[in-house]
Amino acid sequence: MAYNSSLFAAGIEEIRKSWGWFLVSGIVLMVLGAVCIVKAQTATTFSILALGWVLTISGVMWLVNSLQAWTWGGFFVYLLNALIRGVTGYLLIRHPDAGAAGVTMVLAVLFIVGGLFRVGGASAIQFPRWGWTVFAGVVSTVLGISLLIAWPTASSYFIGIAVGTDLIFDGAALLGFAGAIHSLPAAQTRIA
């Protein structure tokens, strides 16, 4: 037990020494998030292109795996997976605006279905403070509906705003973490 606590203390001390890196990383993420929000259309296009390249590369990897499993009965499953990934990736790279429209529609439906599920589940179970979950579900549902209403136009900027918002909140979390670990007292060494 003493070994685990000394190992934990050493880990905390190491993290505490590098609080500046967490601070800088948080600031950089927040700046990148703000750039993504300001240039939402460009960030959306880059996000779809990155997704397309990831799918294309994974499609090639699955194709290589399927050729290595030529004699195995699952060869066609690997091959089908490779084709679906490769073709989807190619289409996203070739037509990023149409890809953004499709991804935005899928996200809108996800927000609606997920929000309704949270509202229904929280209302049925009524766990402690279930009203907050109902509220979050209503917000998610309204966001999904508003995305569908503004769908063709919203698809050109929504993903960039979502990525930017995520980066800002991740950066803020790192800033908070940096402040918390910087304020920790230095580890005391005990003489046994």
Image (tube, rainbow, N blue to C red):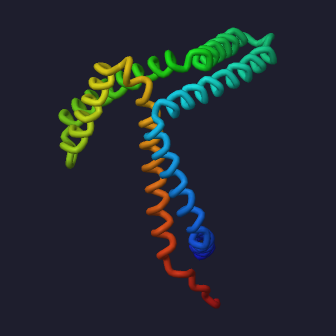
- The residue sitting at 27% across, 23% down in the picture is 145
Q: Is residue 133 left or right of residue 88?
A: left
Q: Quadrant of the C terminus?
A: bottom right
Q: Position of residue 39 (x, y in %)?
A: 48, 37
- The residue sitting at 31% across, 21% down in the picture is 150
Q: Position of residue 128 (x, y in %)?
A: 21, 48
Q: Quadrant of residue 127?
A: top left
Q: Quadrant of residue 189?
A: bottom right
Q: Residue furthest front?
A: 38
* Residue 58 appears anywhere in the view: yes
Q: Position of residue 28 (x, y in %)?
A: 54, 54
Depth check: 118 or 191 in front? 118
* Residue 1 appears anywhere in the view: no
Image vertical order of residue 76 relative to residue 61, above or below: above
Q: Position of residue 97 (x, y in %)?
A: 50, 19
Q: Quadrant of the N terminus?
A: bottom right
- The residue sitting at 42% across, 23% down in the picture is 155
Question: What is the count of numbered marks?
Answer: 0
- The residue sitting at 44% across, 40% down in the picture is 38
Q: Is residue 81 left or right of residue 104?
A: right
Image vertical order of residue 129 relative to residue 139, above or below: below
Depth check: 18 or 25 in front? 25
Depth check: 149 or 110 in front? 149
